[in-house]
Image: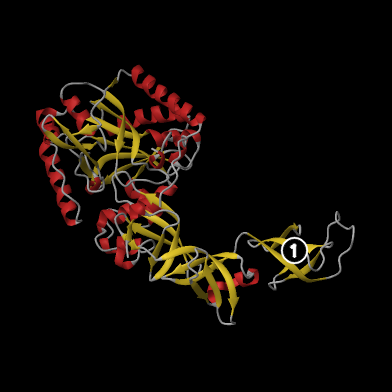
């Protein structure tokens, strides 16, 4: 099955123009706040260990080094700059995730990522609101706990319901034989995607906070109402997941432990293990300043600006035409 | 037989689900940024025509269904089967049963070409072209000159199909009919 090549862009002229305006708005926003624009490699030596992120390997041959990976996010490189004393920084970059294609996904997409030394998650959420609402002209977001969101729309308690109960809830979407190996977080991801997300940010934008510690990724973890929760936040508008931010983990020992736990999880689910990025860990050992950081999908922000429901409408050349 | 993994799913793909051949109508990829990905898939069961919605975890796969569409000429019926022949010059013939022919039976005209969907080499469904041209074999007498005014009457076509036609249509005329709606489109000028 070969499709005819299409040379024309998928996005309209108006969408391309709005993209240029959005970029100018972003650069103006950060220039005004004294955040420095940086560029880090799109092509890196290492990939990531994240169980649910598949990087795209590159076959580079240079300086006696073979291999390389297209980056899934500029996070590690930007944290190395922070450790070197960069101060607040932002970047607009192309990032790559294998296998991701749908109405809200393209394997290559534009990410805006920024970091503020000295900020915690609350302070950075306020700045995200300034940027997003300044561009979209929307109401300021409300804040909702992950636990309350899941309880309200999926009718289970993400912290206290037994795994058995979560699995039973998932039977609305999956056949019994598909439940094997899904695990607690897999169940929660399914419920989040199908039961919760479509309801988020309809009346006004909403930040989801207080993720289970098992979904902390690179965020620090603390106790909240007797549960271990991650200082992680996501912003949802019209059911669209727009950004993901952390009050960043700075502890190199804990970071290495999480990378190794990822790889163990990868082994269990039959995925290849990923080499751990030692340059990144070395930077953490040197000392990453206390900071908060966030990654925001610029293509999705543009979708919201233009009121379109398919990412192809805002991309000059989505992967099928690329 | 080959199989398709979730990241090969797309509209039009023919797969086996619960033992039945299905065609994927819609495939929605859903994934929280840091979480597990899923595909929400809408499929039409080609045996029952029923539409199913199923969810798959990223990385799961479905077996490919041996389903292909072929142009075939309708030859004749022996009362039990309707016989079709490939148009590729091979003269290969395929008998389709009443279930495969379904409602298409009322549009079947000898020597016309239809789309026959084969499942494991046997006719599963027969689809008529969007438009067919058929002769009127019975209708009330026409009213000359009454071309502008509305009003219609039933007319029986050579295949047995009954369609509503304008009052001026007479027996022996050839009509163009839309098989999707069963509606009269126009008269066909006799050549």
- The quarter holding residue B172 reads bottom right
Drawn side of residue B6 relative to residue B137, left or right: left
Using a 10 Å C-alpha cutoff, classify the residue at mark 1 as few (fewer than 14 neighbours), some (14 to 19) or many (20 or more).
many
Give x and y (percent) for residue A112.
33, 30
Residue at 39% across, 66% down: B66
Residue at image location 38% in from the left, 71% down from the top: B19
Please identify the residue farthest to the bottom as the structure is shown.
B79
Question: Residue at point 86% right, 65% down?
Answer: B142
Q: Is residue A84 above or below residue A99?
A: above
Looking at the rendered structure, the secondary structure element under dot 1 is strand
Of A39 and B12, nearer the camera is B12
Q: How is the image coloured?
A: secondary structure
Instruction: For residue A224, say whether it is visible.
Output: no
Q: Can you identify the residue that label 1 sits on? A: B174
Residue B127 shows in the view: yes
Seen at 30% across and 62% down, the residue is: A167
Query: What chain does mark 1 sit on?
Result: B
All told, the count of numbered labels is 1
Quarter holding the C terminus of chain A? top left
């Amino acid at each position: 099955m070969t499709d005819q090549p299409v040379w024309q862009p998928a996005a309209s002229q108006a969408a391309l123009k709005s993209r240029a305006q959005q970029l100018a708005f972003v650069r103006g926003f950060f220039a005004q706040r004294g955040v420095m624009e940086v560029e880090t490699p799109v092509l890196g030596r290492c990939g990531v260990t994240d169980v649910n992120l598949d990087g795209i390997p590159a076959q580079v041959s240079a300086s006696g080094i073979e291999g390389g990976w297209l980056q899934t996010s500029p996070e590690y490189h930007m944290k190395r700059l922070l450790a070197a004393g960069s101060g607040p920084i932002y970047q607009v970059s192309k990032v790559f995730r294998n296998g991701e294609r749908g109405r809200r996904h393209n394997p290559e997409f534009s990410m805006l990522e920024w970091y503020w030394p000295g900020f915690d998650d609350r302070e950075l959420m306020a700045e995200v609101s300034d940027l997003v609402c300044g561009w979209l002209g929307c109401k300021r977001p409300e804040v909702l706990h992950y636990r309350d969101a899941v309880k309200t729309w999926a009718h289970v308690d993400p912290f206290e319901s037994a795994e058995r109960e979560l699995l039973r809830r998932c039977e609305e979407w999956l056949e019994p034989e598909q439940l094997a190996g899904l695990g607690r977080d897999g169940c929660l991801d399914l419920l989040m995607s199908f039961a919760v997300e479509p309801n988020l940010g309809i009346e006004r934008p909403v930040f989801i906070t207080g993720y289970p510690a098992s979904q902390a990724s690179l965020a620090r973890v603390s106790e909240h109402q007797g549960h271990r929760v991650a200082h992680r936040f996501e912003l949802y508008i019209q059911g669209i997941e727009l950004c993901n931010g952390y009050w960043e983990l700075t502890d190199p020992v804990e970071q290495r432990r999480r990378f190794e736990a990822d790889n163990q999880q990868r082994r269990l689910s039959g995925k290849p293990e990923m080499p751990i990025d030692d340059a990144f860990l070395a930077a953490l050992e040197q000392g990453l300043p206390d900071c908060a950081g966030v990654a925001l999908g610029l293509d999705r922000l543009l979708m919201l600006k233009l009121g379109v429901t398919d990412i192809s409408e805002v991309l000059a050349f989505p992967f099928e035409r690329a | 037989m080959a199989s398709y993994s979730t990241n090969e799913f797309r509209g039009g793909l023919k797969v086996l689900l619960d033992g039945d051949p299905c065609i994927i109508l819609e495939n929605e990829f859903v994934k929280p940024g840091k979480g597990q990905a899923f595909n929400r898939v809408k499929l039409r069961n080609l045996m029952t025509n029923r539409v199913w919605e199923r969810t798959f975890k990223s990385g799961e796969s479905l077996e490919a269904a041996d389903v292909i569409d072929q142009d075939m000429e309708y030859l004749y019926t022996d009362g039990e089967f309707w016989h079709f022949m490939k148009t590729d010059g091979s003269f290969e013939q395929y008998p389709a049963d009443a279930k495969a022919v379904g409602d298409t039976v009322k549009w079947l005209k000898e020597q016309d070409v239809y789309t026959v969907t084969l499942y494991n080499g046997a006719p599963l469904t027969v689809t008529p072209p969007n438009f067919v041209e058929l002769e009127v074999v019975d209708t009330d007498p026409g009213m000359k000159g009454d071309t502008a005014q509305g009003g219609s009457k039933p007319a029986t076509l050579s295949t047995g199909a009954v369609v509503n036609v304008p009052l001026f249509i007479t027996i022996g005329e050839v009509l163009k009919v839309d098989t999707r709606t069963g509606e009269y489109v126009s008269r066909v000028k006799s050549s």
